[in-house]
C-alpha cells in the first residue's frame, strides 16, 4: 500500500529551506574533516620517511658492528649518511606541507561566517550610500 503525503506549498518551501541549511552544515563538517585527514596523511608520510631513515642507519651500524670488514665498512659509510639525508628530506617536506595546510586551515571561512560577513558588508554599504 502506498500513501501519498500532501504538503502545502508553504510547508514544502520550509522543508526545502531546512534541508539547504543542513546541507550547508554537512558541507562545513566535510571540509573540516578533509583538512584533518590531510594533516594526518602528512604526519603518516613523515613517519614513513623517519622509519626508512632509521632502518638505513640501523642497517649501516649493524653491518659495521657484526661484519668488521672493509666491504661492510664502505656499505655502512654509504647507508648511514643516506639515512640521515632521507630523514632530513622527510623533515623538510613535512614542515613545508604542514605550513601549507595550516595556511589553508586559517584561510577557510565556514559558510555561516561568510554569510554573516556578506550581510554586514551589504548593510554597511546600504547605510553609506547617499539618499
Image (cartoon, rainbow, N blue to C red):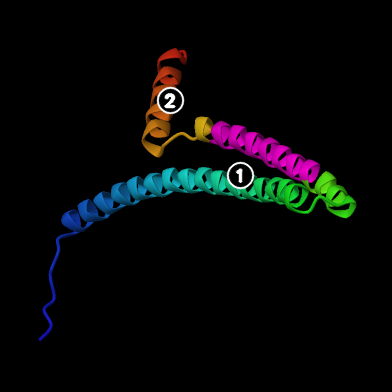
Residue 6's label in the rendered image is: none
Does 10 lie within the magenta span? no
**Residue 131 in sight in this render:** no
Dot 1: what SS?
A: helix
Residue 122's label in the rendered image is: 2
User: Disc 1 marks which residue?
Assistant: 46
Report the residue at 83% width, 53% height from top: 72
Dot 2: what SS?
A: helix
Q: Where in the figure is residue 20, as x and y percent of width and height? A: 32, 51
80 and 29: which is toward the camera: 80
Which quadrant: the N terminus? bottom left
16 and 107: which is toward the camera: 107
Question: Which residue range is magenta in the image?
Answer: 80-104
Report the residue at 39% width, 44% height from top: 28
Q: Is residue 112 left or right of residue 88?
A: left
In this view, 59 is above or below 3: above
Report the residue at 68% width, 47% height from top: 58
Amino acid at each position: 500500500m502506498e500513501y501519498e503525503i500532501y504538503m502545502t506549498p508553504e510547508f514544502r518551501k520550509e522543508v526545502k529551506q531546512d534541508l539547504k541549511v543542513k546541507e550547508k552544515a554537512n558541507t562545513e563538517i566535510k571540509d573540516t574533516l578533509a583538512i584533518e585527514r590531510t594533516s594526518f596523511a602528512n604526519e603518516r608520510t613523515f613517519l614513513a620517511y623517519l622509519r626508512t631513515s632509521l632502518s638505513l642507519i640501523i642497517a649501516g651500524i649493524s653491518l659495521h658492528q657484526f661484519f668488521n670488514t672493509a666491504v661492510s665498512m664502505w656499505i655502512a659509510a654509504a647507508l648511514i649518511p643516506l639515512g640521515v639525508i632521507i630523514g632530513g628530506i622527510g623533515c623538510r617536506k613535512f614542515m613545508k606541507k604542514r605550513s601549507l595546510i595550516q595556511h589553508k586551515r586559517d584561510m577557510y571561512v565556514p559558510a555561516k561566517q561568510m554569510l554573516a560577513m556578506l550581510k554586514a558588508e551589504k548593510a554597511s554599504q546600504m547605510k553609506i550610500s547617499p539618499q
